[in-house]
Amino acid sequence: MNRLCIYDTTLRDGAQSEGLSFSVEDKLQIARQLDRLGIPLIEGGWPGANPKDVQFFWQLQEEPLTQAEVVAFCSTRRPGRLAAEEPMLQPILAARTHWVTIFGKSWDLHVTEGLKTTLDENLAMIRDTIEFFRDRGRQVIYDAEHWFDGYRNNPEYALSTLKVAIAAGAEWITLCDTNGGMLPHDIARIIRETRAALKSTTDEPIKLGIHTHNDSDTAVANAIAAVMEGTQMVQGTMNGYGERCGNANLCSLIANLQLKLGYRCIEDAQMARLTEVSRFISEVANLAPDDRAPFVGRSAFAHKGGIHVSAVQRNPKTYEHLPPESVGNQRRIVISEQAGLSNLLVKARSFGIDLEKQNPLCRDILTRLKELESQGYQFEAAEASFELLMREALGERSGFFDIDGFQIHCHQERTLSHALATVKLTVNGREILEAAEGNGPVSALDAALRKALVNFYPEIAQFNLADYKVRILDSNAGTAAKTRVLVESTNGHQRWRTVGVSTNIIDASYQAVVEGLEYGLSLQERAKALLSLRSPG
Amino acid sequence: MNRLCIYDTTLRDGAQSEGLSFSVEDKLQIARQLDRLGIPLIEGGWPGANPKDVQFFWQLQEEPLTQAEVVAFCSTRRPGRLAAEEPMLQPILAARTHWVTIFGKSWDLHVTEGLKTTLDENLAMIRDTIEFFRDRGRQVIYDAEHWFDGYRNNPEYALSTLKVAIAAGAEWITLCDTNGGMLPHDIARIIRETRAALKSTTDEPIKLGIHTHNDSDTAVANAIAAVMEGTQMVQGTMNGYGERCGNANLCSLIANLQLKLGYRCIEDAQMARLTEVSRFISEVANLAPDDRAPFVGRSAFAHKGGIHVSAVQRNPKTYEHLPPESVGNQRRIVISEQAGLSNLLVKARSFGIDLEKQNPLCRDILTRLKELESQGYQFEAAEASFELLMREALGERSGFFDIDGFQIHCHQERTLSHALATVKLTVNGREILEAAEGNGPVSALDAALRKALVNFYPEIAQFNLADYKVRILDSNAGTAAKTRVLVESTNGHQRWRTVGVSTNIIDASYQAVVEGLEYGLSLQERAKALLSLRSPG
């Protein structure tokens, strides 16, 4: 089986994503996850470009990764000076990595217009910089920036940059589609031509890498095309983070290359952690995970239509390109109007509820579901609310609190705005009246509810509203339209979603927020029950 | 130049997206946009599968599209009955389209395990159903579901299904990668083999289409691979909506095929509207546009790094794979402000405002615009608000009324809910205090405002809120997130849209509602001014 070298640049190129900013601690957490996943080369950053990257490498010297090599990234020296006298290269040495990635210019346009130097000086810069690191015991990966555009524009000059890099001792040559404009057949053709042109340069076969961007929506296919042309290193980022439209998504690449094309990238046991690692990284990045992401997304193996659902239960191959477990994801039967009895039973099982087909309550649950859906409720994105509904029908819903009512007061005078909420509830037989302010009616309501409950359920202090979505259902009805509110809550390690519907947006939000609190408490309660079962005595 | 037939299935396969639900009005709006964009075939839905799709086709009979053909979608008849006696096919006829797309099974596994019928009966179902529609004057596109998996599993049987479809008179054969598991080289090889195997079947060359899904993250590359093998029809959805990981994204496909590969898909003038149409559709779908989307995403031409920014300003080719204007997108320099002076002048002209380039107020308007946009305002879908902003800067904004403040009171006790609004305003020097109830805080506020104003401006009785949309901007911020409200108002013959933004959903709604009333009054005033100019004497 052919082994491929996966090179992760989430921490460097991925960090160029608009709206993404990693702390040193974030970077360390991600590096350790990638290490455990079995990624052999992890580009950690450009030491010297900012204090964070210096500190990151320093901390890894204290506590090294177990298997992976961390790579320091940097450009060739600047024009008109010696590498040994280039201050920019010193922090790279100080990072004390075995591997250094040097990027240099392949495209003549970038040399003359970007660097404002001569084509010959660019060659000297590549040679000098690589030799500088080779002389100091580093192994060098040479990233040929804009390789494909450069080759198209001036193949002869472009090739001369690679020849210099090889002669100077670069171990790997990475061909980069920096602007992301190539299509798979462009990549394949140019790699074939490049390889042929370089044949005479060295006796050993040249080790090539590929680095693609998603501007043409083909980054993954471009990298696969390169591998099929014999490229042995694949660069990309987890979740496809990166500048503009992002880099090639390693989650998709690793799964395609190993599960479909038979290359060896990571251990099988680790492959089954792919989804978990992808979501962990989006948590650390503080970016909402992409539900539609291939392989690892929440919807990647979700079935909605009735035909699909019954077919997939008979034989998953009918509507799944591979078993979701192979990448650590799971099949989801989406609860929706079309939901039949079999969907319901599958769903109940996933909630850990034993529900028999013969149980007459099944009918009741289905009827209630249809009724709520016709009112505008939608449970496909609010499984926690659906579980509460199911447990209620089965008489298993815990009554943590009982709300008697609430009041909201919003007030605006000129530009000064104000929101106040009052709630009245009963917990363990005690009646509580509580009030809170917020920057809007819903946040005021949420604050008042927590204030009222936290003395009884201190774990509520850990709960957070992670997401709040509003959808006007029949928007043509104007402000009299029905509103559906989806709320995602978290306790720091779990997430759950609840729904509310009303013509009054406050009422809809209130329902979703209250169910979110209730579901969180029920999770906690079940976790405690499980612990007490397991504890001896 | 080779012409390709683009086939849009946003309204059918796209609507299978988790969390997406189109109303009939949404579907009509999208169909008209696609028509204007120049998409020749628009799959509208499965008439009979639900009342919405029936109504959609019925409404299009009343008010047809200008250029595009709308296509009705349906499966082959069920096993063991005649097509003429299959009730499922009747609503398809009633939809009165020229084109019908019939999907049938290519994969033996699906015939025996899914349909639970014989391989021969499946062939009869395909033949019968196509003939049924051909006999009734329809042109038929045959969608070969699971083509690639089916061909892999049993090529002989799979090919026999296509032969039957061709013999029965299907105009087009669409090869579908229903499970989305293929990679580009699989697609290319199977299409080559399919074409070769079918050569003997007919004298005329067979017209092939391609339908791909994104489960392997290669949907766009797969469709391109098919086109490079001579496929002349390309199916996909706008923004890549669709079940699981979505369908091939038509925005990316149209741009790649036309701008990079030289095929003709739509007019150049329409190509420059691609971004606008993509965003319009995500507005209607009420899904946040994907900033990282290739070609049309907000970040697709955003430059962040210092080197990139200065290089791109010297020569955009250095870090852009194509000019953003070619797809109607724009370059964004993330740190520095980008002047939109010419845009502004075009916009002013469209409002009937004479604004000279030299006018120093242009700068003021641009600055104000940037400031508001950074707060989350979006004027693309709220031109009335933008016109008010412009007229304000020019000192041309009429003061119809002056609002001093409002109060909202919402109250819920058990399930009884209540909303009351009080407004205080000044009209023509008179101070007015008015209150109204509603079924939610916004409708109460709207009612109170109208009650206060109708005595002064009786035309307000004709105004209506036609649409009310809410979008949470930074939804990760939970209930403290910013809210953007879009309101569409009408006076019975004109429509206009306004926007409001605030962390308080009530304040945001209030801004949009108030500007909606003001803009309506200004329209009325200008109409009167025009009439008095025209009236003799």
Image (cartoon, coloured by chain):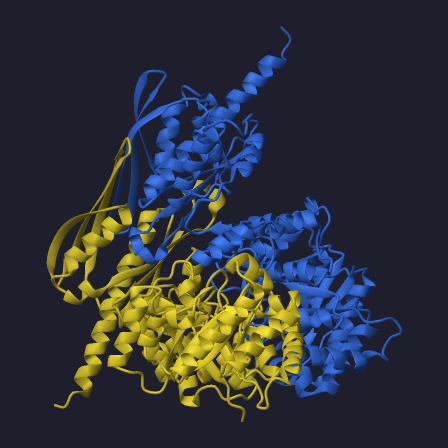
Chain colours: A yellow, B blue
Relative vertical location of residue A502 with respect to residue B397 in this rendering, above or below: below
In the picture, measured across the screen, residue A401 lies left or right of residue A169, that is: left
Evaluate whether residue B395 shows in this view.
Answer: yes
Q: Residue B80 at what x, y percent from top left?
A: 71, 78
Query: Which quadrant of the view contains residue B166?
Result: bottom right
Identify the residue at image location x=74%, y=69%.
Answer: B231
Q: Residue furthest bottom?
A: A1
Residue sitting at 48 percent across and 53 percent down? B310
Q: Is residue A387 above or below residue A318?
A: above
Considering depth in this image, is A88 or A35 the residue closer to the camera? A88
**Image location (x, y in percent) of residue A489:** 30, 63
Q: Residue at x 57, y 27 (%)?
A: B352
**Rendered view: B347 above or below A494:** above
| As drawn, B18 above or below A263 | above
Give the total of numbered labels: 0
Q: Quadrant of residue A90?
A: bottom left
The residue at the point 15 percent across, 65 percent down is A457
| Residue A341 visible in the picture | no
Quarter placement of the N terminus of chain B: bottom right
Question: Residue A183 or B519: which is nearer the viewer?
Answer: A183
- Percent position (x, y) of residue A44? 37, 73
Decide if residue A428 is on the left or right side of residue A167: left
Q: Residue furthest right?
A: B203
Q: Is residue B339 left or right of residue B37?
A: left
From the viewer's side, name the closer residue of B443 and A64. A64
The spot of residue A28 in percent (x, y) is: 30, 74
